[in-house]
Amino acid sequence: MKQENNKVDVILHGEAMCFHSKLPQGAKEIKPSNKTFHIIADSETTGNHHVIDAGTGIKFFEDDAGTCYMVNEKETKVRCVIDNRHDAKTLESGVWEFGIQQEYDHFAQNLRNVRD
């Protein structure tokens, strides 16, 4: 989807959702999940996490509700740990918020997070 200014406002990467946002007041800076990347969507079954590589000019934050944000001063990519599962997607510089896509289970009649 594109905003009026022609910027992409939502990028889907498997079950991960990346969208332009604003850093909320009081969000606390957090360290990457490990020394090389930050997990933005955990893979519950296959270990194929959706990640963003750590680096200069990339900072991660978390608000009181546990929502993860990124402030990146340069383009970066969201990718999978297992390279051939999803194409890497470029995230332009700015503030990004991350979430998980949801699906409706008609048999259980409830909404749940998409899992891989």
Image: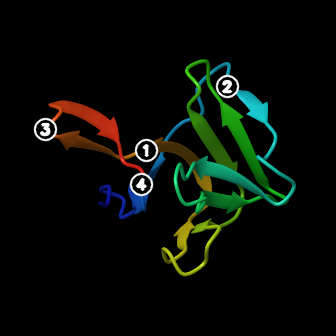
Residue 79 in the image: state x and y as whole percent: 59, 68
Q: Earlier in the sequence, mark 1 or mark 2?
A: 2
Q: Earlier in the sequence, mark 3 or mark 1?
A: 1
As drawn, 35 above or below 82: above
Q: Type of residue at label 3?
A: Phe
Residue annotated with mark 3 = 107
Q: Earlier in the sequence, mark 2 or mark 3?
A: 2
Residue annotated with mark 1 = 100
Q: Nearer the viewer, mark 3 or mark 1?
A: 3
Q: Type of residue at label 1?
A: Ile
What's the CA distance linking mark 1 and mark 4?
6 Å
Q: Secondary structure at mark 1?
A: strand
Residue annotated with mark 2 = 27
Q: Type of residue at label 4?
A: Glu
- Horizontal side of 47 relative to 1 (left or right) equals right
* Circle 3 crowding by C-alpha within 10 Å: few under 14, some 14–19, many from 20: few
Q: Are marks 2 and 4 in contact (CB under 8 Å)?
A: no
Q: Type of residue at label 2?
A: Ala
